[in-house]
């Protein structure tokens, strides 16, 4: 039974309410890792990535230079999911820059969730949330 408030699940509903704009989730991530290393969280509590996420990480994940903070056996993979109108409710897994550029051309306000995942131990965490598309919004985004 999970009561985690910040569990990075993939259901759109559990991510709804996140503020638009670039949000940095490194603090939450660090907290979770610290709790694990202090023994307050078990590995199965932090390494519970959905099988679909692990499959995406293996097949289309972008290799990162970051070693998994939990098992330290593998480099983390980055996976990007885009949510928005006319996209699947579980999000569209975007694996190429070309696909992302096409989504970014849309006038709809879309939201990209960049997630890191370890295919060895199934650690996963939301890294950042980025606005995509919605051209009217672009001027207000910096960086
Ligand atoms: Zn790992």
Image (tube, rainbow, N blue to C red):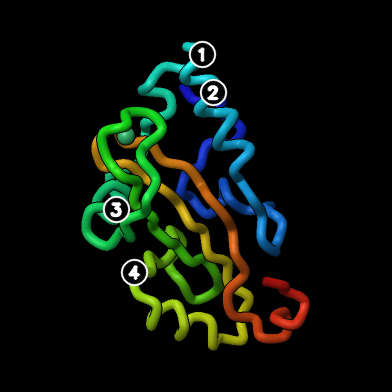
* Dot placed on the residue nearer the N-terminal end, 3 or 4: 3
Q: Quadrant of ligand 1?
A: top left
Residue position for label 3: 57
Label 3 SS: helix
Q: Dot 1: within a 10 Å radius of its alpha carbon, few (fewer than 14), some, or many (20 or more) residues? A: few
Q: Dot 3: within a 10 Å radius of its alpha carbon, few (fewer than 14), some, or many (20 or more) residues? A: many
* Image mark for residue 34: 2
Ligand 1 under 8 Å from disc 4 Cβ: no
* Image mark for residue 38: 1
Label 4 SS: loop
Point out the image quarter for the C terminus: bottom right
How far apart are the alpha carbons under marks 2 and 4?
Answer: 30 Å
Residue position for label 4: 95
Ligand 1 under 8 Å from disc 1 Cβ: no
Q: Residue at x 53, y 50 (%)?
A: 127
* Dot placed on the residue nearer the N-terminal end, 3 or 2: 2
């Amino acid at each position: 039974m999970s009561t985690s408030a910040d569990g990075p699940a993939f259901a759109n509903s559990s991510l709804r309410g996140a503020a638009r704009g670039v949000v940095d989730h490194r603090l939450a991530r660090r907290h979770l890792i610290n709790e694990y290393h202090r023994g307050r969280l078990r590995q199965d509590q932090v390494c519970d990535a959905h099988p679909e996420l692990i499959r995406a990480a293996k097949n289309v994940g972008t290799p990162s230079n970051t070693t998994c903070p939990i098992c330290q056996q593998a480099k983390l993979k980055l996976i990007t999911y885009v949510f928005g109108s006319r996209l699947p409710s579980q999000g569209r897994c975007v694996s190429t820059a070309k696909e992302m550029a096409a989504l970014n051309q849309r006038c709809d306000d879309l939201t990209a969730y960049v997630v890191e995942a370890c295919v060895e131990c199934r650690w996963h965490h939301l890294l950042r949330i980025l606005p995509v598309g919605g051209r009217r919004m672009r001027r207000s985004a910096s960086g």
